[in-house]
Image (cartoon, rainbow, N blue to C red):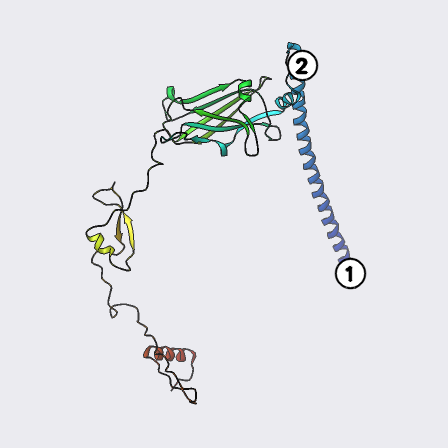
Amino acid sequence: MLLPAVVTGTGCASRRNTELLEAQLRDREDELHQTQAELASVRTDLVATRREITQIQTQLANGTSSAPAPETTRAIAQATGIRINAMQTGGLNQDEQPGDDVLHTVIEPLDGHGQVIAVPGELTVEVIDPSLPPEKRQVSVATWQAKEAAELWRSGLLTTGYQVQLPWKQKPGSRTVVLHVRLKTPDGRQFDSTETVPITPPGDTYADQPLPAEQPLSGAAAATEAQPGVSRILSRNSDDPTGPPVSQPLRPAGYQQPAAEDSPFRQIEEPARRPATGSGSGSSSETVGPAAARARAEIEELFQLPRSP
């Protein structure tokens, strides 16, 4: 009896030790991942600091009279890319004519952590329509120098970045254009971003067309419309496919409701109601219809119950 107990206790202790080791291993893996993330962040900051030092040394060597503010120099060194805010990019209709007149977009410079930062530089925005011939594909383009681009910067709760409204220089021919953005920083680097943008071309009245009004029915369709309880569908007129849809019944022409005796389903009669009985009477009478009597007989036969008199 002693040996099995010792073996069982040893097995339980071994399992507990294994679970403890696995828990410690998971903790070490989590610590390793956290350390690697911190190391990557430190390396990103180190690269940005080196860029900032190089930029300051270049300015001192060139004898630049007006050096930028330290936060501006730091932002330039931290920049790693730009992003087009797709949620705030699209066409705008600023007049009463159908279609969009300008393209609105917000361009966001990013640092190594994916955060939006104010990075100065030369900004170029280009809109291309791939559906047009090569010599006409550039429907709009504009370039702002660093000082001009600084006036486009917005910093708020909903919008942070370069806010640009670019009018068409040539009418787009499709409902989708390609937006390309380029930012050149003072330290000589260049960042690009591209986004596909849906628009409504100028003069396109498709989106402004009202729904066709319902036309009054005539002939057989009007006669069928007057029939109660008949389901209907909308379909195109074969003589005029471009005309408004007409209402047609789901039942074919000449359809008649089948008589009760021709129906494949058995008609169940409603059982007769019980007559009212007096309060002083010790017995009551019940009238049962033929359908209810047949149903009761089938139930009694199914469950082998004694038949009622």
Residue 252 is at least partly visible in this image = no
Inspect the image, locate mark 1, and give the three-letter code of the amino acid beneath it: Ala
Quadrant in which residue 77 is drawn: top right
**Front-most of 62 and 94?**
94
Inspect the image, locate mark 2, and give the three-letter code of the amino acid beneath it: Gln
Q: Which residue is mark 1?
A: 5
- Residue at 60 percent across and 24 percent down: it is 79
Which of the image's four quarters has the N terminus?
bottom right
Quadrant in which residue 251 is drawn: bottom left
Residue 28 is at least partly visible in this image = yes
- Residue at 71 percent across and 40 percent down: it is 28
Q: Which residue is mark 2?
A: 57
**Front-most of 16 and 165?**
165
From the viewer's perspective, is residue 284 above or below residue 243?
below
**Front-most of 303 and 91?**
91
* Residue 156 image point, x, y percent: 57, 31
Disc 1 is placed on an element classified as helix
- Residue 286 as seen in the image, left or right of residue 150: left
Question: Crowding at label 1, few (<14), some or many (≥20) Cα neighbours within 10 Å?
Answer: few
**Gap in Å between the C-alphas at discs 1 and 2?**
78 Å
Quadrant in which residue 64 is drawn: top right
Disc 2 is placed on an element classified as helix
